[in-house]
Amino acid sequence: MAVPTAAIPTAAIPTAAVRSKNVRTRVLGSLALSLLLVGCAGKAPSGYGLMGSQSTAAQAQEQLAAAEQANQPDTVQTYLDLINQMQQAGQWYASLAHADAFEKQHGARPESTLLRADALRNTGQLEAAQRDYQSLLETSSKGRALRGLGLLYASQGQYGEAIAQLEQARQLNPIDASLLSDIAYAQMLDGNLPAARVPALQAAQLAPGNARVQLNLALYWLANGQQDDAQRLLQRLSQPQAKGAAPLIDQQSTQMLRSQLDQVLQAAQERSANPASSPQAKTSTVVLFEVPGAQAIAPEPDDAVTTNPVTAAAQPNTFEN
């Protein structure tokens, strides 16, 4: 007589996919906790964004080794995530080395090529970065590649070409606040304040907690003569947004803002003096959607750009990386 066997609940046996997901979650969670502890032990953040600890790359490598020792099947995505973590922490040279190592081990794919292109751009290897971005224009990473090309051209002062690339990227992702802010900033550096208005306001409303985005809006208002609006915004950003939270900006941020204002006012003055000199002077920015409730801003007189004296200083980069 056959002895009936008890049914084994399938839920009690984790599948390989579930085990992979759980291990990956633990690995990334551990890395995030490490970064948090390092940040808590350091000085308070200043300027436009947080800079990561110098040990971030080493921590990422340790986490990857831990994942491999745990027999994690999906080390590919984990490795890509860790390279991205390095870049978020400003570890561009380390991330470039790991991007090369990744492709040697797993082969090139759009995600790794994009990470390498960003690393190349942020380490000054512009020609190689441009080749990588252009190789992605027929892939699923086209939007981010176009944005990378825009930032690359902007870093060389080619603002007309930068705006063209960024606008193409916006057509693929019209609600990316960082991208919209980049467009606004590029338009300001090109001296085209009216074209900067809508993307600056869109970005600010889409990302109210992003200091870089909000400061670009303050920059636009200052350059456009809207001193009261700018001062109210800066005052709000200088206050903690929640109990126990640090302000979004500090004194260094406002000093950077003054130096950027100097360059924007100079660009606007040059455009007013010779509108035909700019490739963007006779074109209009494509607006994919309007910000509800945004107030119309009348253009300032040609001599308005000379009414805001500022201290000249080195130009920091307020494009998102």
Image (cartoon, rainbow, N blue to C red):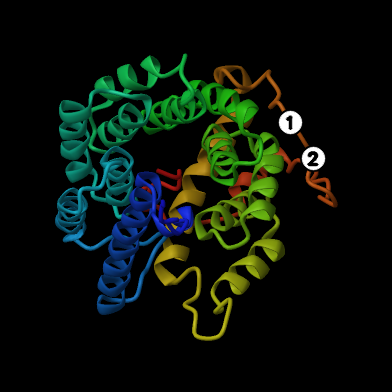
Q: Residues within 10 Å of mark 1 (few under 14, many from 20)?
A: few
The residue shown at (57%, 53%) is 219
**Residue 107, percent across and down?**
23, 23
Q: Position of residue 41 (x, y in %)?
A: 25, 78
Q: Which residue is mark 1?
A: 287
Judge left or right: residue 136 versus residue 275.
left
Say few, some or many: other residues with alpha carbon within 10 Å of mark 2 (under 14 / 14 to 19 / 20 or more): few
Which residue is disc 2 drawn over?
Answer: 290
- The residue closer to the viewer here, 173 or 151, is 173
Label 2 element class: loop
Between 263 and 100, the residue placed more toward the observer is: 100
Image position, residue 283 (x, y; %): 68, 19
Residue type at mark 2: give it.
Answer: Glu
Visible in this render: residue 314?
Answer: no
> Disc count in the image?
2
Q: Quadrant of residue 149?
A: top left
User: Viewer-proximal residue, 315 or 76?
Assistant: 76
Locate the C terminus and report the quarter of the image it occupies: top left
Q: Nearer the viewer, residue 192 or 204?
A: 204
Could you tell me which residue is drawn at 46 percent across and 18 percent down? 139
